[in-house]
Amino acid sequence: MIFAHPGILFFLLLLPILAWLKGKRGSSPAFLYSSVRLVSGLGRSNQSRAGRWLAALRWLSLTFFIVALAQPRLPHSHTEVKASGIDIVVALDLSGSMTTQDYEVNGQAASRFQMAKSVLKKFVTERPDDRIGLVVFAAQAFIASPLTLDHDYLLDTIERLQIGTINSDATAIGDGIITALNRLRNLPSKSRIIVLMTDGGNNSGKTDPITATEAAQTLHVKIYTIGLGNREIVQQMGLPPGFLPDDDTLKQIAQMTGGVFYQADNSEKLNSIYDQIDRLEKTEAVASKYTQYQELFSWFAGGGLLALALEVILGHTLLRRLP
């Protein structure tokens, strides 16, 4: 058992002193007699122990209350995990064009968004030692998950993502990069990267993609860019060029930061892209997981109340004394 406020236990040392002072001073007489002869017979009677029992209950209740205020608790679990990995923020496009079904999985058509989620979940599952965060962007950019080693939480977050959750009418690639950078800028890691997944060109947002990339250069953050979409199928579907990624800009972003540009025009390529991240430089990070406690305050507070109630009841019944 440990205490959240152990300093309060100091008051337990005062209880014996207070008990000694109270016993030394004694209590004031309740009756005045004109002559001691009237009570001389009481001296031969047995001394009652009622006062001792009631006083003991009073000090016991105070002891329980002081221990309760110190907040006793039982720790259930505490683990410190030293993980070797890299700090990664994935910036995922949630614009409306991500619903385009130009991928094929097991002979079935699949949308870019479905493929991106599937591959990203596999990537997270296979890298338990990497701190991974998630940024989503369309017309605006938002943090979906901070950098974390709690990959179960991250997988649940990815599963909940849907097109239309944010304004999906445009693509703000620059804002997506800046939002991801803000999660990485103050970290001491040797290897910090952004994985940018998009299927279009920048047509919204407050920051130009190249300006955002220059900021990444300054912070020594690598950006790996992935262009989603199959050009052949898009042409067969008769869709406009806006349904294809801006390869030139994505290549420039990657080259400026020391990353790599990938054209993921099929599911096999998209799966293999993340496998190459294993060759990145590793760094160590220590993550302390939260300790779970069983609070014992109510038990000690209840014990104090029970002792106090017992003193009152006995003082008015079995151990009743003259006032």
Image (tube, rainbow, N blue to C red):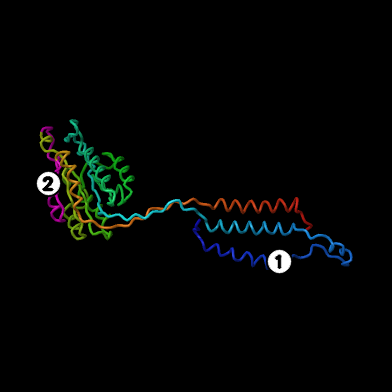
> In the visual, does 300 lie left or right of 198?
right
Q: Which mark is residue 23?
A: 1
Mark closer to the chain start, 2 or 1: 1
For residue 247, which numbered disc appears in the image?
2
Determine the residue positioned at 21% across, 43% down: 170
Q: Please report the residue visible at 60 percent of the width from the left and 56 percent of the height from the top.
A: 64
Amino acid at pointer 2: Asp
| Residue 20 within the segment the image draws in magenta | no
Residue closer to the observer: 239 or 221: 221
Q: Position of residue 291 (x, y in %)?
A: 42, 53
Q: Position of residue 313 (x, y in %)?
A: 71, 50
Seen as rendered, the residue at the extreme top is 107
Position in image of residue 316 (x %, y %): 74, 52
Camera-near label (2 vs 1) is 1
For the C terminus, the image quarter is bottom right
Segment colored magenta? 236-264
Disc 1 crowd rating (10 Å Cα; few below 14, some 14-19, many 20+) is few
